[in-house]
Amino acid sequence: MRLQLVLVLFLLATLASAPVCREPEPSAKDITLTLDSLESKFVRLNFRLAQENWLLLTTGQADSLEFYRGLYDWVVGDESAFDRLRAGVKQAQNETDQRRLALLYPMFLRSHVEQSRQVRAARDSLVDLMSSYAPMMDGEARTPASLAGTLRYDAERADREKAYRALHSVGDEAGALLSRLFRLRNQQARGLGYNNFFGMILSATELTLDGYVALLETLDSATVEEYAGLTDQVRRSLSSIEIEIWDVPYAYSSVFREVDRYFPVDSQLNYIHRGFQDIGFFLNKLPIYFDTKTLEGEIPSAVALTIKAPFDQRVAYTPSGGLAACRMTAEQIGKALRTAFINEPRALYSSICDEIWTGAMARVFADIFGQDQWLGRYASVPGELIARYRRARHQQDLVELRLTLLQLSFEYEAYQNPNRDLNRLYWDLFEKYMLLPRHDDMRPWAATIEYVTRPAQSHHDLLADMISAQTLAYIEKYQGSVVANPETKAFLVQNYFRFGSRFPWNDLLQRGTGEPLQPRYLLERLGI
């Protein structure tokens, strides 16, 4: 017995004194080889995923889609590749490797959190709940689109309130699970050395956390006075002592219906083709395929997919009336145009796209197709109606910006401390940004699917709006109108499109406009 004890003590002492075996730090060559391998995989994977998604979109069937989704998850979940990319962030020595890391590392960083067992289970449960939930109004199941229509156009205030409550009612069931998802993501991020998940995501982008918070504060302070005046105007127009959140969209929506009459279904494609042609883009001569027999049901009027840039872009289009549908179609065609003009020998710069920049380039065309000159030239909208529409658009965009600031601020604060009462946090921020009565019996924040499927990425849409506003302001200042001006195409292709994702979006914006991102251009577009 004593001999066994001595032997055990000897083995423990030996183990304690033995050198710890660690994986050697990867060399610059190792990192380059990893990047080469991943680049080859993602170029092929993105091509196959785009093909399968197009089949699903246009036929309703894609037999291999789940296989390629699983393969994608397996690649971005490779821990050894993740470790090498983490090391490469500090060690990459050449410009090409640094840029490839900037494109690939955020995917692996996010995947490390999102593919953890508990996070994935909570996220998938929320997606299932939100996608299958049937909101009820007056005892009948309603679609989100029909509820949004009631909220915007119904003259009965009681019905608008019912629609608003029904639209967000899934939050009552989703609140506890979404709170848990915030906590679980934070736990995984702290395991990687970050304070919280939101800070982790921003650390791998061109934004800093301080810069992000400062941007929200700047936009808040610059718009709060104008927005307060708008709420007073709505109150007077509705002859109401106190207005509610479900009153605001209705107050300025009638003019949109008037404008929509100038955009019948059978005229929209003609407007769109002429509008693009007059700025230099001849759609029938570009590698863009249109499918106009799909997209049935409650999905957008147009969706663009790049199969293989710059050779194969596709747009699925469902004809539907109204200016909003026309602008959405122009936006999706804009996504296809951006990739159709990429001129980069490295396939990765065509295959992986920066979400912020892609959204911004698409937004440029949606904004062009809503300008006063465009409405008059192509749809023959009368000048008097255009003037009223412009005022209503400014009001709508201002309200949407304040809602965006609310949603972004809530998400930021929720990750700072997800253990607090998140419903109270939401309504405190609601009072700050919307200047309207709170309703603590509802949980609209828990009905926001972007918090589930696009965590810490909703600000991409705000940045895209800002980039578009700054770009169009520059073109108008130095090259004239962006409508019916071929210089619009020349500027976009020469300064933006041809590079694909070779450069960060902030570098491209500086290259094109001579300035870093400036909030004032978005504010000027709002008439502020």
Image (cartoon, grey):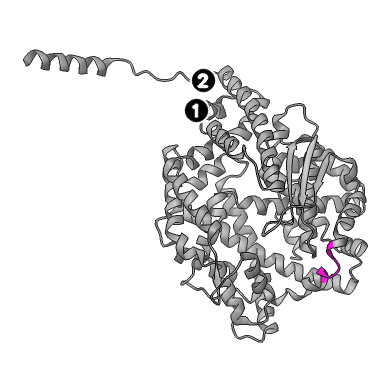
Q: Which residue is mark 2?
A: 26
Does 155 appear above or below 69? below
Which residue type carries mark 1?
A: Asp
Q: Using the image as rendered, state which of residue 421 and residue 512 is in the foreground.
A: 421
Q: Using the image as rendered, state which of residue 70 and residue 245 is in the foreground.
A: 70
Marks 2/1: CA distance? 9 Å
Circles 2 and 1 in contact, beta carbons < 8 Å: yes
**Residue 337 image position (x, y, % from top left):** 81, 43
Which residue type carries mark 2?
A: Pro
Residue 72 in sight here: yes
Residue 514 in sight here: no
Q: Is residue 481 left or right of residue 190?
A: right
**Residue 75 image position (x, y, % from top left):** 55, 31
Which residue is located at x 71 percent, y 64 percent? 397
Q: Using the image as rendered, state which of residue 199 and residue 221 is in the foreground.
A: 199
Q: Using the image as rendered, state which of residue 410 and residue 351 is in the foreground.
A: 351
Does 28 appear above or below 524? above
Res 167 → quadrant: bottom right
Which residue is located at x 61 percent, y 44 percent? 207
Does 389 appear above or below 37? below
Res 251 → quadrant: bottom right
**Residue 297 image position (x, y, % from top left):** 68, 59
Mark identifier at residue 229:
none
Q: For the magenta stretch, what is the residue range?
A: 259-265
| View extreme (left): residue | 1
Q: Which residue is mark 1?
A: 83
